[in-house]
Image (cartoon, rainbow, N blue to C red):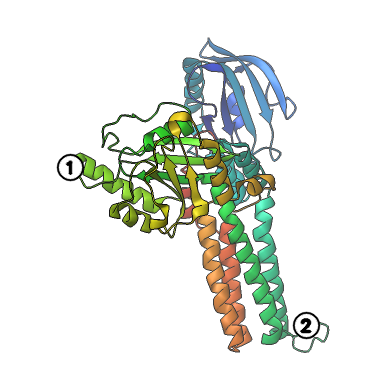
Amino acid sequence: MEDTICAISTSKGVGAISIIRVSGSDAIEIVNKIFSGKDLTKVDSHTINYGHIEYKGEVIDEVLVSIMKGPKTFTTEDTVEINTHGGIAPTNKVLEILLEIGCRLAEPGEFTKRAFLNGRIDLLEAEAVMDMIDSKTEIQRKMATNQISGKTSSLINELRDDMVQIISNINVNIDYPEYDDVDIITNDVLLPKITKLKEKITKILEESKNGKLIKEGIKTSIIGRPNVGKSSLLNALLEEDKAIVTDIAGTTRDIVEGQISINGILLNIIDTAGIRNTEDMIEAIGVEKSLKTMEESDLVLFMLNNNEVITDDIKELISKIKDKEYLVLINKTDLESKLDLNSINIDKNRVVYLSIINNEGIDELKNKISEIFNISNITSTDPTYLNNARSISILNKCLDKVGEVEEAVKNNMPIDMIELDIKSIWEELGTINGSTYEEELLDEMFKRFCLGK
C-alpha cells in the first residue's frame, strides 16, 4: 500500500486516447518529473492540465494530465491520469518511463483493492465494478449500478444490525440484570426475532435467483435426435448461420454456442449433437457431451420432428428432463404429423409448434421462455440483488446456522450459548461485504479483475 502504482486503464489497441493511471503518495511528484507544462505539485485538485511528456530531452507525447488529490479519489490516494494519444507505442513508452522513475506496475484489480482497503467501498461494491465492466445488457448495468451505490450492501447491513440488537440485549441482560428499562431476553422473546431473521435471509436468497439470472443469463441446451432442426433453431434465434445445417445425420458432433437477449436477459444457447446410438467414436463423444450439457442447463429445449413417430428412446430422453425447466418444440409443422403427444408424459402448456423453414413459432418460443422465468417482472423492477456465487454461498450457510439457532431456542438452550452462535453468524455475514475478511480471499477475488482497474 506504500508503493505508488501505475497501469494502462484503457483497452489495448489503437484508439483516440489511452489513459495511464497512477495512484499513491508519490503519484503527483513522479508524474511531475516527466511533465512539461505547469508544476503539477502546485495545481488545484481535480483539474486537467495540458502539456507534454518529456524524458531525457525527448518529447514522448502531447498529453492531458488529470490531477486528483486524496482523499476525494477512487483509491482515496493522490491519483494522476495521463491521457495520451491512443497508439500502442506512445502508451507503452509512457508506462515504461513511469516504471523507470519510481512507480510499480499495478496488479490486476489493485486500484479497486486499494479503494476497498482504504474504506472507500465495501467488498460487494468492489465486485460490482467488474460487473459494470462486463455488463452486456441494460438490466445488468442497472444491477451493477445499484451494487456500486451500496443498495445491495444495505441488505446485509440491515441483517447485521438486527443481530447486533439481539446480541446487545442478551449481553445487557447477562451483565446488568438489575437494569429495569432493558427488555428481558428470554427464549420466548428471542424465538420470533430469530424466525424473522430467518425469513429475511430466505427472502434475500429467493430474490438472489433473479440476480444470478440477470448476471449469468439462462444456460439453454437444444436437445433432440439427429435432423430434428436443432442447428436450424440456433441459427434462427441468432439470426445468423452459425451452425452447419445439412440433411446428413450426425453433422453436429460438438456443441455450438450462441447468445441472444430476451427483454434484457441473456439466453446462452448451446446446440448439441443429435442423440442416438452410434458406432462413430467422435459422434459418440458428442452425444455424451450433449447429455452432460442437458444435465447442467437451466432450460432444455427438447425438439421433436412433427413427421416422425415417438420412439422408446425419445420417451427415455424426455424422462430425463421432467425435473428441469423445459419446453418441448415440435418442428416441421409444415409436414404431415405422425406424432402422438399423448404417448409421452409432458406438460402440454410447455409445447411450442415450429416451422423453422417458414420462420414460424420463434416469437412464441421467446414468449414462453420469458413466461417460464418471469423475465418481464424481473426486468421491470429495481434490480437490487446478490448475484455472485461467493455471497450467495455464504448467505446459504448463514441461513442453515440461523435454522440451528431457531431449533436451539425451541429446545430452551442457555441464552449465553445462543448468543455465541448469533455472534458467529454476524461475523460470517460480515465476510459478504468485507466487514470481516481474510487476505487470501482478497487476493483470490481481485486477481480476476482487469489491469488498470
Find residue 183 and name its label.
2
- Residue at horizontal 33%, vertical 29%? 244
Name the side, left or right, on which 34 lies relative to 311.
right
Name the side, left or right, on which 315 lies relative to 47.
left
Residue 172 appearing in the image:
yes
Tell me if residue 244 comes above or below residue 140 in the rendering: above
Q: Where is residue 126 in the image (x, y as percent from the top left)?
A: 59, 46
Find residue 261 and name its label.
none
Front-lying residue, 430 or 96: 430
- Residue at horizontal 39%, vertical 28%? 242
Front-lying residue, 39 or 199: 199
Secondary structure, mark 2, is loop
Tell me if residue 391 comes above or below residue 452 in the rendering: below
As drawn, the residue found furthest toward the right would be: 181
Secondary structure, mark 1, is helix
**Nearest to N terminus: mark 1 or mark 2:** 2
- Residue at horizontal 51%, vertical 44%? 217
- Residue at horizontal 53%, vertical 64%? 396
Residue linked to disc 1: 281
Q: Position of residue 115 (x, y in %)?
A: 61, 44
Front-lying residue, 54 or 142: 142
